Image (cartoon, rainbow, N blue to C red):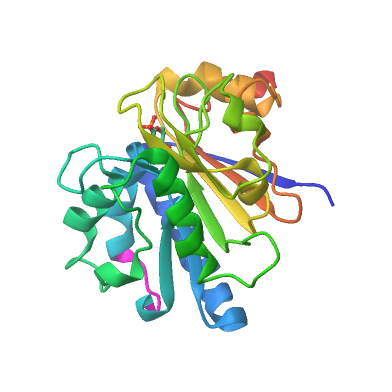
Amino acid sequence: MSTNRVITVVQSEDDVIQELCDMIQITATNAIEKDDVFKIGLSGGSLTKFLTIGLQKITTDWSKWIVFFCDERVVPVESADSTYGIYKNSLIGVVPLDEDQFVKIDPHLPAEEAAKDYIQKMAVHFPPDCLPRFHLLLLGMGPDGHTCSLFPGHRICDETSVWVAPVTNAPKPPPSRITLTFPVVNNAECCIFAITGAGKAEIVKRVLKEDEQLPAGRVKPTDGVLHWILDSEAGAHIKDI
Ligand SMILES: O=C1O[C@H](COP(=O)(O)O)[C@@H](O)[C@H](O)[C@H]1O
């Protein structure tokens, strides 16, 4: 099986949010029709802003959503660095998602234990004895080409034995994190990168040239679809690929 990659360049950040949320709505509808549940993984960073704005506008059966994290920072939920904390404050009460629909890390554990605990929590929602297959993973990318908390050159980029790995020395603060590993990311039915801004144009070009030194360039769902949604600034150099 090869990855089906689709690149969409739109004008502005607002257009990226619109395109992203249209895709989320379609993917959720299809998943609920097929499996009676929608299993989605969220990232942090700029995606939190996109979803806070965009998810309010979609039409879906929210009761069927189970929301996981592609990565999470091991910090208290009250911290501005907690990805769950951001979604909790910006989404709950705004869209009809309950706190218990989020599969959250235990931020009181050290990263190693939090990763093991998260694997147990994930296992409740996926069939036994096979890799979890998410309906949708929403991914971001840092200007260094990291995605989830998979940073360039970090040994966990080559981790194949666990679904979720701890990171205790992330080069971007906060240092303590957990992250899905590549086997799980690449087993998803669909992955979407939503990227904006001129600061990411150069790295977008490198990743789309399939530079496998860069973690984002290693996202290649083995039996799924990979979407890149870019604004005109982030997509400025893609004619050169
Ligand atoms: O630290 C993180 O960074 C990436 C990228 O963030 P962005 O602000 O450049 O969009 C994000 O996808 C990841 O979830 C987060 O933990």
Pick the front one: 129 or 4: 129
Q: In which quarter of the image is ligand 1?
A: top left
Residue 59 among magenta residues: yes
Q: How many marks?
A: 0
The magenta segment: 57-61
- Counting from the top left corner in percent of width and height, residue 187 is at 68, 54
> Residue furthest toward the right?
1
Q: Where is residue 214 in the image (x, y as percent from the top left)?
A: 61, 23
Going 32% across and 60% down the picture, which residue do you hit? Answer: 55
**Could you tell whether 124 is left or right of 222 in the image?**
left
**Residue 117 position (above or below residue 110):** below
Is the stretch drawn in magenta largely helix, strand or loop?
loop
Query: Where is residue 8 shown, x and y percent of the image?
Result: 57, 42
Q: Is residue 232 left or right of residue 204?
A: left
Relative to the observer, which residue lies in front, 82 or 96? 82
- The residue located at (39%, 48%) in the rendering is 114
The residue drawn where x is 53% and y is 83% is 36
Image quarter of the C terminus: top right
* Quadrant position of residue 6: top right
Q: In which quarter of the image is residue 237?
A: top right
Identified at 39% across, 39% down, the residue is 111
Q: Is residue 159 above or below residue 51?
A: above
Is 213 situated left or right of 197 in this image? right
Q: Is-magenta flag for residue 235? A: no
Query: In the image, residue 56 lies at what x, y percent?
Result: 27, 63
Front-lying residue, 26 or 38: 38
